[in-house]
Amino acid sequence: MRLRSGVFAAGCLLVQALGVGLFLRGFFPVPVRSLPWREARGVPPAEPPQPGAGTPPIPGVTSNWTKIPSPLFKKVVIVLIDALRDDFVFGSKGKQFMPYTTELVEKGTCHSFIAEAKPPTVTMPRIKALMTGSIPGFIDVIMNLNSPALLEDNLIWQAKTAGKRIVFYGDDTWVKLFPKHFVEYDGTTSFFVSDYTEVDENVTRHLDGVLKREDWDILILHYLGLDHIGHLTGPNSPLVGPKLYEMDNILKKIHTSLLSKLQERESSLPNLLIVCGDHGMSETGSHGGSSEEEVHTPLLFISSAFEKRNDPGFEHFKIAEKSHGNWIKLYLEGNNSEVLLNLGKKVLKQYLEALKILSSSLSKQVAQYDMYSMTVGTVIVLEVLLLLLLSMSKALSSRAEFEVPLSPPLFSLLFYLMCLMLCAVHVIVCTSAESLCYFCSISWLTAVGVMMLISALMCVILSAFGKMIENPKLPAKNPAVSSSSWSELDVLILAGTVGYAVSLGASSFIEEEHQTWYFLINTLCLALCQEICRHYFLVKECDLQLSTAVKQNFEDIEETTQCRKVDIPSCDSKLGKVTSSSEFLKGSEKWMGLASPLIILICCRLLRSLNQTGVQWAHRPDFGHWLTSSEHKAVLSLLAAVSLVMLFILVQRRCSLVSKIAMALGLLGVYSYRVAIGNVVFPWQQDSKDISKGIIEARFVYVFVLGIIFTGTKDLLKSQVISADCKTKSIGLWEVYSGLVLLAALLFRPHNLPVLVFCLLIQMIMTRCIWKPLKFDAAQITIMHYWFGQAFFYFQGNSNSIATVDISAGFVGLDNYVEIPAIFLTGFATYAGPLLWAIHLLCYLSSEVSRNSAAMGHGCFCYALICSVPVTVYIILVTGLRYHLFIWSVFSPKLLYEGMRVFITAAVCMFFTAMDQNRSQKIHD
């Protein structure tokens, strides 16, 4: 079967995406279920009885208690303040903005702790952890957007079963987790992060009424405003203080009401107020990672009962502390007897044994890997990579197409034997495995299809390898894209790719991966500088011989003209003018080419100062923090305005007139949107009040984004279907690219707009001064685009921590939470850098078709290969490191990023293939 390189690469990446999906489903553990087998298998637990009804025994559920203990509190109020960091209560902000809460802590009427949340520090997994007492699975970070009903044994279910009446107001995630457990509830959408006032007022408006009533036992309040402020403007925003003061007044109202009810009934049990946060807030205002700011939250137990007696847990700690003190006292007294030694060994043994049991218990709950699904996914990913590597020489040939040996392997005896063997393994594993397995839970028809796919890939690999051994001679390459020997640039590209893949085995390199890409692109600029010097300033021997021959010819002509006595002063002047003009242009081209790597290095250095990322230095202030502070809003406004003007200048040069007008109006709408939400100001704006919520302004920009993309798509369809015009295709691709730039400008925060400007500027410099003059081949240019795309991913402020994902971008222009647009906008804003460089690669290679007809096929294949290498290596590494100390805080988030990158790369390669359709038409003609 004859396939083009692009089609083959896109198909390989789709298969690899399947393998990565299987591996992810097997790697991220399924949480341990405390319910019976039927309920753990997906049957929902029985609906808890209504208040006042009896509590008949549920079949299959046994209780550890022979007698229900007497209650310690009459009413319990749980106030969960989303993204409440520990320093917001115990630090300087707490003393300034939460005086009542601080006074309770200092007076001793409450027990206060610093709770440590385990990653992923996002809302839904943390609610599950608070209510079940177990550590949730890491896969819950994806399910956070659509929470299913909680099937594990939990406090809410137990309280409802015991006849307690539970009232809830706040984040509707609770309603999704506990759909039939509240006698009264009012849920608010948690994902519309642009709102930080109404989302809390909707909770507080119920407070006066419910505190006066006696028809409830447990009241749960989940406030979201602080978390939304963090996503919008960060923890140092001037909005944080008023919000903390608002929360302090609410706690004061609740505590006062509980105390007054206790005084009305002196003999009644005391009430309990619990104040906590589900997770913290990073220095950028997000969460999801494992930094101290994200995992440390306050936990307060406030009750009048604590004024009378100490908590039993605290007393046990005091006893243990006293015993430890006796050992220290004996040691300080110089007691060297065998009693002291034995006592120390005993204490050490008890500590180590306790830690071992706790660690083992937690590991069993968290690390329930589905090894069978992981193995199947790894095999598919490895086979795809091997197939790409074996096909590289043919895929990069001058025709960019080759014969894929499908028919002989698929009708061979080996294929059927492998299918039978894999199906037998599948039956054995699925019938003997004690734990749940995702691959065993799918239908048999689907499982057999996957086994046939694995067998077919293996047979094709063996067939390709056999042909390579039989005919080791490589196919002839296009002279325009091949060289006789490896250059320094080729060595750098190979060493950088291999070195990056190997570095993924170290947690520190993953945490600081941006340093790897910054180093690689800086080194690449130096290598390009060497190539430019060699191209322009090193004269080869053949060039000297050519210049000597040309000089001799001119001398012969001159002698001939003298013999014939021909007067040619006018010819000499014209020739001199043309020669001087060409020499001037060539000289300016030389110096512009030589200066271009230096300019790119300066741009990259400025971008590094804009956003601190990674883990080690993320807490240090950067230029972005300085710009986003309230006192520098005028500077930020000027920078945003200048950046938008520069974007228009850089983008409009290849757009049609209609697209230029749409781009100008769209960029004006971007600035108006940022003014509306209070990020920047108009020069004539008199006060700092927000004009609107920005809904209308953002939708105004969306209209022009869709218009520009529609115009480009129309040109692309015209070039592909009607006229096969390369110029029309080039214009269409650039207009699609311009529409994406406008969308990125809308979703990026104002201080990140220079990232877009420098992205376009570097692309223009490299196109005009490096790639075209030096005539690099498509493979080299593709890898350069990939490297710069990865670097710009980190220039945006991203990292391998989930906390740096700017989820507020998913709600630009939305007045409610709509799942699909929110996911798309968040994903595009996160991967805008790699996507824009990938689309620019497509634009560039489409313009190179006249010089190299196989450029787009080569680019698509190299793009697929350069993405497949690190993800395959990382899957193997993370399998071996699955019990590493940093598996959930470092390696698992990176695995999610790599998986998402595979899916995005597959989509990009499919777009490459669609744009290369005229190549197939030319071949058939």
Image (cartoon, helix red, strand yellow):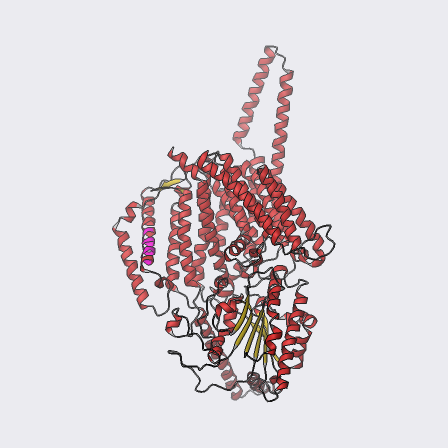
Q: Nearer the viewer, residue 345 or 628?
A: 628
* Residue found at the far top of this picture: 564
Q: Nearer the viewer, residue 689 or 898?
A: 689
Asked whether, in this view, residue 354 is left or right of residue 792, the answer is left
Can residue 601 be seen here? The reply is no
In the displayed structure, 315 sits above or below 564; it is: below
Judged by its main secondary structure, the magenta piece is helix
Q: Nearer the viewer, residue 390 or 437?
A: 437
Q: Which residues are magenta?
A: 447-456
Q: Nearer the viewer, residue 119 or 250?
A: 250
**Magenta run includes residue 188:** no
Asked whether, in this view, residue 139 is left or right of residue 266, the answer is left
Location of the N terminus (image quadrant) = top left
Image position, residue 874 (x, y; %): 45, 57
Can residue 630 be seen here? The reply is yes
Please identify the quarter of the rendering in which residue 547 is found.
top right
In the displayed structure, 835 sits above or below 108; it is: above
